[in-house]
């Protein structure tokens, strides 16, 4: 299957700083990627849809100025958590929809464990 | 928007028994229903999926059934093994978008 690579896998940052997370589709082009957040023992909550060459679409309740998404190419989407606070500590996961066809599936990155101290 | 409800939140079975997890969805336009297994700190792993043009799909010990009229779908695991212990999530999506709305998750424990 297709491969989606996410980096870093773990990051610790100080309150008030910004953190960038990268999501790459390694062997296919993804015009659309998705960002999810998962708190401990909870489900994956969709944060936003990342569209190549255009603005991201954010889910209700997600602050677009805090979670900046850039989809600069067909293989790379980035999520920047700006002015991070301890409550932003979470597991962030990206996904990309497989290229072509009607029977494809979502491919997930490894996830990024963000800890804000 | 779409809302997916998943039950039960926890499920404990004896090795060899069957396990059933159920999900309901709200958007009748949803047409893709995957099931994921997630181990702690790892990415979700697709174990089986079903599209709305079929009512049932089976892959060895795992099966999924879909009732479009009632808007619910279920995961069936037979002959459970301790390595089946994990958190399972259902999800729903519409069109061919890849935008997944997840259920709350079920922690499955298979006792040896």
Image (cartoon, coloured by chain):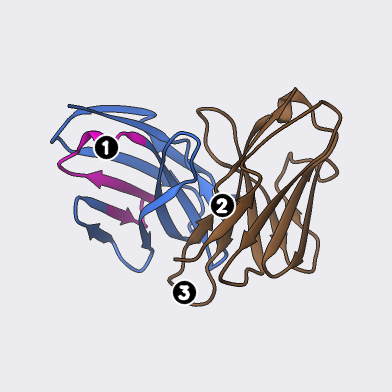
Which residue: 78% across, 45% down? A80
Q: Secondary structure at mark 2?
A: loop
**Residue B71 visible in the current orientation:** no
Q: Which of these two is toward me, B67 or A94?
A: A94
Q: Around disc 1, counting alpha carbons within 10 Å, would you say few (fewer than 14), some (14 to 19), or many (20 or more)?
A: few
The residue stretch that appears in magenta: B64-86
Residue B74 included in the magenta stretch of the image: yes
Query: Chain A's colour?
Result: brown
Q: Is residue B24 above or below residue B14?
A: below
Quarter the C terminus of chain B occupies = top left
Question: Are discs 1 and 3 located on one and the same chain?
Answer: no
| Nearer to me, B49 or A92 | A92
Q: CA distance from mark 1 to mark 3?
A: 32 Å
Marks 1 and 3 close (CB-CB < 8 Å)? no
- Which residue in the structure is indicated by mark 1? B83
The blue one among the chains is: B
Chain under disc 3? A
Q: Residue at x 55, y 41 (%)?
A: A44
**Residue at (72% x, 43% y) in the render:** A60
């Amino acid at each position: 299957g297709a491969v989606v690579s996410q980096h870093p896998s773990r990051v610790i940052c100080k309150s008030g700083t910004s953190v960038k997370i990268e999501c790459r589709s390694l062997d296919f082009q993804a015009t659309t990627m998705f960002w999810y957040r998962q708190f401990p023992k909870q489900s994956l909550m969709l944060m936003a849809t990342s569209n190549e060459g255009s603005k991201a679409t954010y889910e209700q309740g997600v602050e677009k100025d805090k979670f900046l998404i850039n989809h600069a190419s067909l293989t790379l989407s980035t999520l920047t958590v700006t002015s991070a606070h301890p409550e932003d500590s979470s597991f962030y996961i990206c996904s990309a929809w497989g290229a072509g066809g009607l029977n494809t599936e979502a491919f997930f990155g490894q996830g990024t464990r963000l800890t804000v101290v | 928007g779409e809302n997916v409800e998943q039950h039960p939140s926890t499920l404990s079975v004896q090795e060899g028994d069957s396990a059933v997890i159920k999900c309901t969805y709200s958007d009748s336009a949803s047409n893709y229903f995957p099931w994921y297994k997630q181990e702690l700190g790892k990415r979700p792993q697709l174990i089986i999926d079903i599209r709305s043009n079929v009512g049932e799909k089976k892959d060895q010990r795992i099966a999924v059934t879909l009732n479009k009229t009632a808007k619910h779908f279920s995961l069936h695991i037979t002959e459970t093994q301790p390595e089946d212990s994990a958190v399972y999530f259902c999800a729903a999506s519409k069109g061919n978008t890849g935008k997944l709305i997840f259920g709350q998750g079920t922690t499955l424990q298979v006792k040896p």
